[in-house]
Amino acid sequence: MTAVAGMTGTEARSFCTRSMQIAGTEVVADRSGALYVPAEHTLIVADLHLEKGSASARRGIMLPPYDSRETLRRLADVVARYRPRCVVALGDSLHDRSAESRLGSVERAEVSDLQTGRDWLWITGNHDPVISADLGGAVAASLHLGAIILRHEPTPGDAPGEIAGHLHPAARVVLGGTGMRRPCFVGNGMRLVLPAFGTFTGGLNVLEQAFATLFVDHHFDVHVLGQNGVYPLARASLRTD
């Protein structure tokens, strides 16, 4: 259990987190899939994919239409717990280039409320290379926070200090003959890939080739998101899909 700067002991005990080091900087992995950088009072979330449900409906795939509202509600819960000075949305915050136009008035008000009283940065991604000023906050392709660099898409090869999203990492294990697949953080102490925060986002198995290009020595740590906390998994326990 890790207490978070700015929180009381009672608040910290109400949920589980896991502290780790990325390029010598302490970061706190939250069970929601968000990441907190205490020294910078910064909360990071990746791959919100707002309006994925409405995009699917346009293709005839019927998903519940409230994914954006649910994603923003969960984000509001995390912001309320950590009370960050800055929030960084790490790319693919919008599911496609027209997603912003599909956001309803309720969702837009929720985004505005989240931005009130703090800095907010949209990192551009492959799904949302352009984010208009109408959504508030600032927009950039990347951000340096001391020894850390935040960007949407991970850089192949060694990338010390990089924290990215894009790949939606997930881990699969088999327990008692039953398979379980969960979103996860994956890193090696020098770099980290965050799980997708958005509803309906799915995940890519960490044993896929896309991760091998990031961890060329095949050494990485996996921390899965559970109902009550963030749990480390031994690499030997991981299974392919």
Image: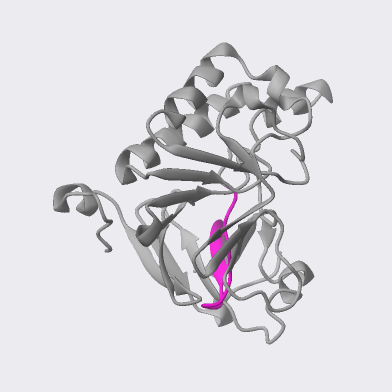
Position of the C terminus by quadrant: bottom right
Does residue 183 belong to the magenta stretch?
yes
Q: Residue furthest bottom?
A: 217
- 65 relative to 87, above or below: above
Q: Nearer the viewer, residue 93 or 32?
A: 93
Q: Nearer the viewer, residue 5 or 57?
A: 5
Measuring 41% from the left and 33% from the top, which residue is drawn there? 76
Measuring 59% from the left and 37% from the top, which residue is drawn there? 138
Q: Residue furthest right?
A: 59
> Looking at the picture, how far across and down is residue 114, in whole percent?
44, 30
> Looking at the picture, how far across and down is residue 211, in whole percent?
71, 70
Q: Would you identify the image quadrant in which residue 121 lies?
A: top right
Does residue 7 belong to the magenta stretch?
no
> Looking at the picture, how far across and down is residue 46, in whole percent?
59, 48
230 vs 122, left or right, is: left
98 vs 181, left or right, is: right
Is residue 105 visible in the rendered structure shown here?
A: yes
105 vs 32, left or right, is: right
- 158 relative to 43, above or below: below
Count of marks, rendered view: 0
Q: Nearer the viewer, residue 115 or 176?
A: 115
Q: Would you identify the image quadrant in which residue 205 lies?
A: bottom right
Position of the N terminus by quadrant: bottom left
Is residue 64 visible in the rendered structure shown here?
A: no
> Looking at the picture, how far across and down is residue 96, in whole percent?
77, 33
* Magenta range: 182-196
Scheme of colours in the image: one colour
Measuring 70% from the left and 18% from the top, which residue is drawn there? 102
- 123 relative to 49, above or below: below
